[in-house]
Amino acid sequence: MSTDSRVEDLLRELAPQVLGALARRHGQFDACEDAVQEALLAAALQWPDGGLPDSPRSWLLAVASRRLVDEWRSDSSRRRREEAVAVLDVPGQPTDQDDTLTLLFLCCHPSLSVPSQLALTLRAVGGLTTAEIATALMVPVTTMAQRISRAKQSIKSAGVRFGLPAEAERADRLMVVLRVLYLVFNEGYTTSSGPALLRADLTSEAIRLARMLHRLMPAEGEVVGLLALMLLTDARRAARTTADGSPVPLDEQRRELWNTAQIEEGVALITSTLGAVPVGPYQLQAAIAAVHDESASAEETDWPQIRALYEVLERVLPSPVVTLNRAVAVAMVDGPRAGLAVLGTLDSDDRLAHTHRLEAVRGHLLELAGEAAAARESYRRAARMTASLPEQRYLALQAARLG
C-alpha cells in the first residue's frame, strides 16, 4: 500500500472521531464539520511528505480547533459566540473518547428528512465523498452536494446539542442509523467506483459501529440482524477477488478461504433472534447469507430456502434490488427463463437506471439459457454502466468469452 493510501485510510478512520470530539466540546455541528474538512485537507497535503505526527488524532483536533477559532474571530458576533463556547467547553472533558456513535445519532436527527439524514451521516461518519454518496443513493452529484449543505444548516437552525438521544428517541432514529451503516458497508464491500473492488476500511468501520450499536441496544432484533449480515458477508472477503483484483462470483469462490470465525459468530447472532423477536429485513438478509455460508459447496446451496426467504423479504421491504436477487434464486430453482421473466418486471423501474446490476444479472441468466449473443450484449451494456474498474474488466471479459 502506498503512503498516500495509508494516509487516506487513516484520515477516513479519524475524521468521525475528530468531528465527534469537536462537536461535543463546542457544539455548532456545521462549523465543526467545515473545520474538520479543512484539517483533513491540510493533513492530506502535509503527511505524505512530512511524515505522520506522533498523535495524528491530536494533530487533526488541534488544527480543526484553530480553524474554528479563526472563523469565530472573524465573525461580527465574536463575543456572543465566545460566550456560548465558554458554556459548552466544560473543563476536564475527555478528549480521547470515541464519539462516533453519538455523531451517528446526531446526523439522524428528526429535524432532517430521511434523504438528508442518510447523506449527512455517510459524509460525517462513514467518511464517503460526495460522489460516493451520490452513487450509493443513486442521485446526481450536484444534488447530493446541495443536500449535504442543507442538512448541515438544518442541524444548525434546530440548535441540536451534542449527545446521545433519550432511549425513546433512539428507537425513532434507529432504522435510518441501520440503513446508513448498511450503505457504508456495501460501499466498502463492492465499491461504486475506482480501481479496487473492496475497501476494507469501510467494511471494518461499519462492523465496528454495528458492534457499538449492538452493545447500546442489545435487544433490538434488527441491530442483531445487521451485525450478523455484515459478519456473514464480510466472511467471504478473502475469496472475492483474484490476485489481480478481479471479482470472483460466489459459486466460484474457494470456500476454504472464508472466515469461519465470522461465519460462526454471524450464524449464532441470527439464530438468537429468528423466532424470538419480530422479523425485519436485516434479519432476513442475514438468514439468506447464512444459508450461503453454511453450504459446503455451491452445488449444495439450498436455493429453494433462499428463494422462499427472498419472497418474504420482498413482502417486508419491497425494492428493485430485492426483486433482482429473487430473480437469481428463481432461476436457480425453476430455470433461467423463469428468472428472466422476473427480471422483465424491472425493465421500467427508474431506480435501476443508475446501476449496472440489472444488465449484469440479465447477462448471466441469458448465458445460462443458452442465448450467448444476447448475454454478450447485456454484459457489454453493464460494463459501460459501472464506474468500478474491476467490474468493468470482469464484465468485458465475460462478453469477450462469449465471442
Image: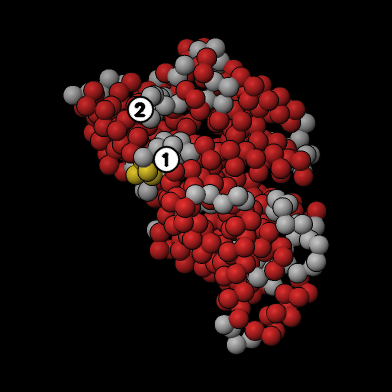
| 209 and 357: which is toward the camera | 209
Residue 275 in view = no
Q: Earlier in the sequence, mark 2 or mark 1?
A: 1
Q: Residue at x 34, y 44 (%)?
A: 387
Q: Residue at x 71, y 29 (%)?
A: 269
The residue tagged 2 is 244
CA distance for labels 2 and 1: 17 Å
Q: For the residue marked with disc 2, what is the amino acid?
A: Asp
- The quarter of the picture where the C terminus appears is top left
Q: Secondary structure at mark 2?
A: loop
Q: Residue at x 60, y 42 (%)?
A: 206
Q: Specify how the rendered protein is coloured.
A: secondary structure
| 335 and 109: which is toward the camera | 109
Q: In the image, residue 1 lies at what x, y percent?
A: 44, 37
Q: In the image, residue 164 lies at what x, y percent?
A: 75, 57
Q: For the residue marked with disc 1, what is the amino acid?
A: Ser
The residue tagged 1 is 2
- Is 107 on the left-hand or right-hand side of 302? right
Q: Select label 2 or label 1 by which is in front.
A: 1
Q: Secondary structure at mark 1?
A: loop
Q: In the image, residue 182 lies at what x, y percent?
A: 57, 43
Return the residue found at the far left: 403
Asked if 258 appears above or below 92 in the picture, the reply is: above
